[in-house]
Image (spheres, rainbow, N blue to C red):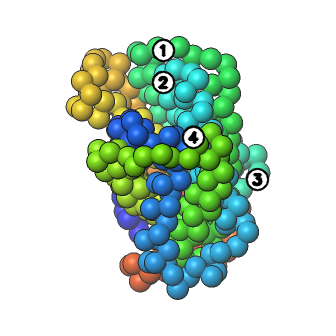
Amino acid sequence: MRTRTLLALTSSGLLWGTTVPLSKVALADWGPAWLTVARFTLAALPLAWIGRRHLRRALTPGVAGWGVAGYGVVIVLQNAGIERTSVSHAALLIGAMPVLVALLTVGLGRGRVGPVAWLGFAVALGGIAVISVDGVGAASLAGDALVLVSLLFAAAFMVAQPRLLAGRDPVAVTAVQLAAAALGTLPVAVAVDGVPTAAPGAAPMAAMVGLAVGGTLVPFTLFAWAQARISPEVAGAFLNLEPLVGVVLGVAAFGDPLGVPQVVGGAAILAGIGLNAVPLGGRRTGPAAAGPAVTNPAAGSTAGSTAGPRELTGAGVG
């Protein structure tokens, strides 16, 4: 189960790394808000069918509300922030997400992060900083603030998600949350982007489908499945794979320069993720939240969650 959890988290991070180049292609014909609506709607439909037997249990105000906040609000704020600040600033702030998750988890008394885990956060954040500062663009305080606010919503969502998943099917929960995010973003799309007057071209449409399937449906489901079996502070560390993949794709597909900063920063990100994965070798891998077992319909297996708050140490889960 520990190996499956690691693979699920790693796959999620790698797939999320493809969303930046796909978004660049899609935004040629899609407005930012409409792209979010279409992406989440297309991803939610097959998930709802797969998890249809468990939708009733997942369809609660809490699950839907966190879907709007954790997916819809986060993406809208991040898009608005990135438009107003530099790529390097946005990447550095997004790279701080695992640290925000850990701080929020500790602040709420739901866990304790040991020295090895903190070292992993620092190393990974340092790697992202090395990559980011190599390409400085026009930054603004307003843009940085919007990205930071989006990360606060995202961190709160990651901390709340294990409790929402407890006793529920992760596929059904993800379907409800993505659908709620699409509905919640729809008024913003109409107000900000306006009503579309023409259909997107073939390439932007294909990129949107790629975002919905490879950048949303598959990674969100895998991440939700993994979050039902691991603490949010450890799961959050794997988000650092996203900027690493973005750099690789930028070099391979867009001709971005590859130098010492990219190589050193990428190695540091991988090392930081490795340090944060150390707790998986401990005695427990259940989520920090209390709750009944969570069933995975695809594998036909059941993973029990742990009652009460727990401690996350560098040497394992105690």
Residue 110 figure quarter: bottom right
Q: Residues within 10 Å of mark 2 (few under 14, many from 20)?
A: some
Which amino acid, mark 3?
Gly
Whether label 3 touches label 2, CB < 8 Å: no
Numbered disc 3: secondary structure: loop
Which amino acid, mark 2?
Val
Task: Give the alpha-carbon distance from disc 4 to disc 3, as whole Å.
Answer: 41 Å
Whichever of callouts 4 and 3 sits on the residue coming sooner in the sequence is: 3
Which amino acid, mark 4?
Asp
- Find disc 4 in the rendering and name its residue: 193
- Find disc 2 in the rendering and name its residue: 87
Residue 24 figure quarter: top left
Evaluate whether residue 99 shows in this view.
Answer: no
Whichever of callouts 1 and 3 sits on the residue coming sooner in the sequence is: 3
Question: Which residue is depicted at the point 40% across and 30% down?
Answer: 268
Whether label 1 touches label 2, CB < 8 Å: yes
In the shown orientation, is residue 176 left or right of residue 50? right
Q: Nearer the viewer, residue 197 or 227?
A: 197
Q: Residues within 10 Å of mark 3 (few under 14, many from 20)?
A: few
Task: Give the alpha-carbon distance from disc 4 to disc 1, as whole Å.
Answer: 25 Å
Question: Which residue is depicted at the point 58% across and 57% down?
Answer: 182
- Find disc 1 in the rendering and name its residue: 137
Q: Nearer the viewer, residue 75 or 33?
A: 33
- Find disc 3 in the rendering and name its residue: 109
Whichever of callouts 4 and 1 sits on the residue coming sooner in the sequence is: 1
Numbered disc 4: secondary structure: helix
